[in-house]
Image: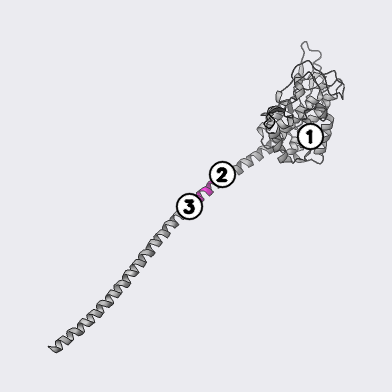
C-alpha cells in the first residue's frame, strides 16, 4: 500500500497534516491526530499561565499567515477556539477548514466578492460578514476575539447591542465592535496592563474598518515581539507534562481554598467564643456593680446601727447615773 504525504503534514505546518491513499478504490484521507482543542483546554484549566497562552496564539498567527499567503488566498471564515487544535507538544494548529474558501484574491488583497452567505460563528464575525465583500481581515477580526477569549478565559459571548439611543439627543447611535466587548476588555487591561502588546493587538483586530486591522504577517511580528525572551519551562512541556503541572496547580489551589475555609470556620468559632466571653464579662460586671451597691447599702446600715448603738450606750450610761442618784437620795 502506498501513501502520498500531504503538503500540510509536516510537524511545523500550522494546519493538521494528512495522508492520501492514491491507489485506493475509494477516496481515503487520513488526518493527523490532535489531542485536544483550545476550547476544551480553556474550560478544563481555569488558570493557564500567560506564557502558554501566548505560545498558542503565536502558533495561530503562523497558521493565518500560511492561509493568507496562499495564491490564491484562503480565508478560514470560522476561526474559533473549537477549531484550534493542540498536539502532544502543545503546538496549536488551525483545523476545520470545511467552512474555508479559496478566494479570487492574491496575497495582499483585503477583500473580494463572496457568494457563500454569512460565514462562521456569529459572535466571532466582523460587520462586513453580513455582506458579500470581505477577505483575510475577516479572519483577523475572529483572531482578535479568539485572543480576548484565550487571555481572559471568559468567553465574550454576551455582547452589547450594536446600536443604542442617546438620551440627550434622542438619536440612535452605533457602537463599535470594541465597545460591544468593553466588559471583556476591562479585565484584560486590568490583568496585563493597557500597554501590553496583546491588548493593543486585540484592539487592532477588533476594528470595525477591515483596512485598519493588522494583517496576519503583522500580527505574527507582534506576537514574536511578545514571545521574545520568553523561554519558561511551560513552552518545552508536552501535553501530559503540562496537564500534570496544571493539575498540580489546581490541586494546590484547592488545598489552599480548603485551608482558607477551615481558617474561616476556626475564626468564626473564635469570634463566637469572644462574644460569649464578652457577654459573661458584662454579666459579671453587672453582678459586681450590684454587689458593690449592696455593700454600700450594708455599710450605710452598719454605720447607722453604730450610731444607734452609741446613742443607746449613752442613754444607758445616763440612766445608770440617774438610777444611782435616786438610790442615794432614798
Nearest to the observer: residue 118 or residue 16: 118
Residue 90: image location, x then y, percent: 75, 32
Work out which residue is located at the far bottom of the displayed protein and give it.
328
Q: Residue furthest front?
A: 169
> What residue sits 22% from the left and 82% below the top?
318
Density class for disc 2 (Cα within 10 Å; few <14, some 14-19, many ≥20) is few
Q: Which mark is residue 261?
A: 2
Label number found at residue 278: none
Quadrant the C terminus occupies:
bottom left
Please name the residue that numbered disc 3 is placed on: 275
Q: Which residue is mark 1?
A: 201
Image: 37 above or below 22: below
Q: Is residue 31 visible?
A: no
Q: Position of residue 62 (x, y in %)?
A: 81, 29
Residue 94 vertical position relative to residue 312 in the rendered view, above or below: above
Magenta segment, which residues? 260-274
Amino acid at each position: 500500500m502506498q501513501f502520498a504525504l500531504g503538503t500540510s503534514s509536516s510537524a511545523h505546518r500550522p494546519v493538521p497534516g494528512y495522508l492520501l491513499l492514491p491507489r485506493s478504490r475509494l477516496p481515503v484521507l487520513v488526518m493527523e491526530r490532535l489531542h485536544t482543542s483550545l476550547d476544551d483546554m480553556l474550560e478544563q484549566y481555569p488558570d493557564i499561565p500567560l506564557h502558554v497562552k501566548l505560545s498558542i496564539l503565536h502558533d495561530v498567527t503562523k497558521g493565518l499567515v500560511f492561509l493568507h499567503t496562499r495564491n490564491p488566498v484562503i480565508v478560514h471564515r470560522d476561526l474559533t477556539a473549537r477549531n484550534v487544535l493542540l498536539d502532544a507538544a502543545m503546538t496549536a494548529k488551525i483545523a476545520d477548514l470545511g467552512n474555508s474558501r479559496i478566494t479570487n484574491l492574491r496575497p495582499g488583497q483585503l477583500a473580494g466578492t463572496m457568494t457563500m452567505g454569512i460565514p462562521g460563528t456569529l459572535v466571532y464575525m466582523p460587520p462586513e460578514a453580513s455582506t458579500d465583500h470581505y477577505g483575510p481581515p475577516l479572519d483577523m477580526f475572529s483572531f482578535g476575539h479568539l485572543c480576548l477569549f484565550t487571555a481572559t478565559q471568559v468567553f465574550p459571548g454576551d455582547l452589547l447591542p450594536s446600536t443604542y439611543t442617546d438620551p440627550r439627543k434622542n438619536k440612535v447611535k452605533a457602537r463599535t465592535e470594541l465597545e460591544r466587548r468593553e466588559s471583556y476588555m476591562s479585565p484584560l487591561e486590568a490583568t496585563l496592563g493597557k500597554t501590553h502588546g496583546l491588548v493593543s493587538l486585540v484592539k487592532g483586530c477588533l476594528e470595525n474598518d477591515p483596512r485598519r486591522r493588522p494583517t496576519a504577517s503583522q500580527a505574527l511580528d507582534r506576537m514574536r515581539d511578545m514571545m521574545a525572551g520568553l523561554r519558561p519551562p511551560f513552552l518545552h512541556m508536552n501535553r501530559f507534562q503540562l496537564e500534570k503541572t496544571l493539575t498540580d496547580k489546581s490541586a494546590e489551589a484547592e488545598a489552599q481554598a480548603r485551608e482558607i475555609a477551615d481558617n474561616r470556620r476556626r475564626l468564626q468559632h473564635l469570634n463566637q467564643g469572644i462574644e460569649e466571653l464578652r457577654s459573661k464579662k458584662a454579666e459579671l460586671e453587672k453582678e459586681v456593680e450590684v454587689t458593690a451597691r449592696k455593700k454600700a447599702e450594708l455599710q450605710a446600715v452598719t454605720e447607722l446601727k453604730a450610731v444607734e448603738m452609741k446613742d443607746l450606750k449613752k442613754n444607758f450610761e445616763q440612766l445608770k447615773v440617774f438610777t444611782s442618784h435616786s438610790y442615794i437620795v432614798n
